[in-house]
Amino acid sequence: QSVLTQPPSVSGAPGQRVTISCTGSSSNIGAGFDVHWYQQLPGTAPKLLIDSNSDRPSGVPDRFSGSKSGTSASLAITGLRAEDEADYYCQSYDNSLSGYVIFGGGTKVTVL
Amino acid sequence: DVRLVESGGGFLRPGGSLRLSCAASGFTFKNAWMSWVRQAPGAGLEWVARIKSKIDGGTTDYGAPVNGRFTISRDDSKNTLYLQMNSLTTEDTAVYYCTQGRYYFEYWGRGTLVTVSS
């Protein structure tokens, strides 16, 4: 069971907006650690999508956005496209594990 | 361009040992914090180990499931990261990714598959 909780799946029609939540606790997200997001297309390695809660690396479309509040973070995808169908993971650090890296369990986004 | 190329994966029996390598290029390896992240079949991502740059102390950290069994190391003269894995169990079966980044993983290799089975 992951320290960061994500919904197993979300879905939406092309053009719609979907959000993925990442819920932590006072020992990780709530302690002030940044949240980062990765996209993993089928059969490929993960790719950094959002870093430091809301920053988009070069080349990431502005359809992807991130936010953080309290003990949770969210990833939003607007104007959903077929190529967005993938697994998405949040990542942060945890105080109770001496600053170790933690991942969410992952969310499968399906484009209907 | 940044390249991370893992090698050394394979099939082995429980209790065996294996050493993974990651050849890095396209960035100043000696200044980079490097990690291994694994993904069991059909499962999510799991952080395995991290090594800081020597200028930042060169210290290592491990995830609880591998602590005491795995050792991460680096050879800055060869731009290569290693993961020595001992006392392997079936639960270590996964694709092992080499990653670069200090607080998040900016670059990833394609991974190397390790299968532990009796």
Image (tube, coloured by chain):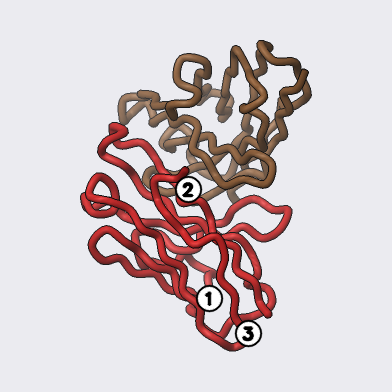
Task: Residue under label 1, please give it.
Answer: A61
Three-letter residue code for mark 3: Ala
Task: Residue under label 2, please give it.
Answer: B105
- Quadrant position of residue B59: top left
Among the chains, which one is brown?
B
Among the chains, which one is red?
A
Is A79 above or below relative to B14? Answer: below
Discs 3/1, front: 3
Label 1 is found on which chain of the structure? A
Three-letter residue code for mark 1: Pro
- Quadrant position of residue B39: top right
Q: Are marks 3 and 1 on the same chain?
A: yes
Query: Residue B71 at x, y = what percent?
Result: 50, 18
Task: Residue under label 3, please give it.
Answer: A13
Query: Residue B2 at x, y = what percent?
Result: 58, 48
Which residue is the extreme one toward the bottom? A15
Q: At numbered mark 3, what does the secondary structure look like: helix, strand or loop?
A: loop
Query: Residue A64 at x, y = what percent?
Result: 48, 74
> Which residue is more in the foreground, A74 or B60?
A74
Looking at marks 3 and 1 on the same chain, the residue that comes earlier in the sequence is marked by 3
Three-letter residue code for mark 2: Phe
> Which residue is more in the foreground, B117 or A99?
B117
Please give left or right for residue B59 compared with residue B11 in the image: left
On-image quarter of the C terminus of chain A = bottom right
